[in-house]
Amino acid sequence: MLNTKEIRSYFPILNQEINGHPLVYLDNGATSQKPIQVIEAIKKYYEFENANVHRGVHTLGNRATDSYEGAREKVRKFINAKSTKEVIFTRGTTTAINMVAQSYGQANLKEGDEIVITHMEHHSNIIPWQQLAKRTGAVLKYIDLEADGTLSLEKVRETITNQTKIVSIVYVSNVLGTMNPIKEITQIAHEHGAVMVVDGAQAAPHLKLDVQALDCDFLAFSGHKMCGPTGIGVLYGKEALLDKMEPVEFGGEMIDFVGLYDSTWKELPWKFEGGTPIIAGAIGLGAAIDFLEEIGLDEIEKHEHELAAYAMERMSTIEGLTIYGPVDPAKRAGIVTFNLDDVHPHDVATVLDMSGIAVRAGHHCAQPLMKWLQCVATARASFYIYNSEEDLDRLVTGLLSAKEYFNDVF
Amino acid sequence: MSSNLDQLYRRVIMDHYKNPRNKGSIEDGALTIDMNNPTCGDRIHLTLQVEDGKIQNAKFDGEGCSISMASASMMTQAVKGKSVEEALQLSSTFSEMMLGKDYDDSLDLEDIESLSGVSQFPARIKCATLAWKAMEKGVSEEKE
């Protein structure tokens, strides 16, 4: 277990009462809280370095550019990319996946080609492909899930064919917590000549990413789920692919030479970063990476497996509580999605909120998965580095009182 | 904890949730409105039978939390037999109640009054207003 007491001390927001109870924040799948190190880095940028990047001859312009590009190098190391040319700053995971669909997808797909995704995708890894399929006449195919909410490589092999041009799969499911065998799936995709896109939104905060070991072609993730600010994310792409791709946004910052009727683009990665970039966001993300690496990504992953195991053990003692996803805690990240009897998850979440416990209730931006689970909505507790076993004890107590409240009082 | 929650979950609300009134669907010649709350997945299928500017019958089906389903049950009960104008007036009174404003208490709100506590739970206001929005949409389509 991590030293959660020390880690908590870096998060000012956690030191408060909600509805008369100390806050237990278990909605990290939606967004994580921000440590003082990240808040300070953004403050320092605005107080001492703020200028536009890549254009100022003046000192502040150089400081801003150095910090912004320094953050890119931190991201490169964080995901073990070969070069910073392969690291594009975006607004978040959604923008990153849309960029792949609009640029690579639009240029390389034709009628009858296939795009393969799964039933456990977040809407951000479904809709860009639906739209691409509509525009190009490609076929969108889903890999079916096993009963425990995992993927079998057998079904992956059955679904991916020589017509498949893009395979796009979530690394860690935001609902089921399932950790998918991305390396193996990438290999299968490559055997059929397809490119592999990885939605890493729930993976980047929780485990060590290594794009070279995975051999994936694209990887998308967001800063705000990994202690960074909102509004910043990353698209990783292999240089050979990015090099051939057209930009999605045109304007300032991304150009080399502009004529009256035609223009040329900057080299990678800047050709994909039209307009003034999210400078403070990137710097904040860099600080978040420093913070997480100081703790250690392997330690973080271990901590979350332990919390998931503890939560599942404690929660399974509550009669009438259903947990979705893999039964084996080693197969899941720190995400536990559940329903309590016939109490609607909104009502569960309201009762927990009255005890100072923040969980998510709803469809978690995964309506097709809810359909697969045959429920309209679920409640989700998702953990992070500052959560402890005591937090989960509070959750269990809260769930028991919710059950009592709805079953006995009425 | 319970005292705060009791503001929200009044007994009459839970009664409507567990024993919904006017559950189902009017088969013939009714206005049909499907609405959902995309942020949380609550869903309502409302059917209204409007004749001569009067809501003769109202039924609902759907899935959602106690607040959304109880509110739908109460809404159908309240608008049945009322003129379209009266129903819309009731709906605007309900909106004011949800916003925590002073509302017209000269109207007989009956069970609906029990939802007034929802205004103190901002995250739940949309749950309570879903059925009313569906009703407004239905009768405004009828008017056109």
Image: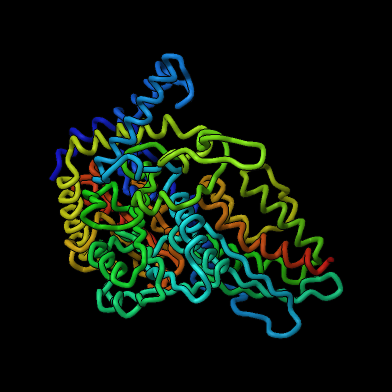
Most distant residue in the top direction: A59
Rendering quarter of residue B115:
bottom right
x, y percent for residue A37: 29, 28
Q: Is A214 rendered above or below residue A155?
A: above
Direction left: furthest residue = A1
Q: Is residue A23 left or right of residue A214?
A: right
Q: Position of residue B103 (x, y in %)?
A: 70, 46
Image coloring type: rainbow
Q: Residue at point 28% right, 56% down?
A: A335
Residue shown at 55%/68% (left/top)?
A136
- In percent of width and height, residue A35 lies at 30, 32
- Pick whichever, A306 or A164, lies toward us: A164
**The quadrant where residue B102 appears:** top right
Q: Nearer the viewer, residue B32 or A221?
A: A221
Q: Residue placed at 52% from the left, 68% from the top?
A: A133
Q: Position of residue A241 (x, y in %)?
A: 38, 54
In the picture, which quadrant includes the C terminus of chain B?
bottom right
Task: Determine whether A98 is above or below A59 in the image.
Answer: below
Give the residue drawn at x 29%, y 48%: A204
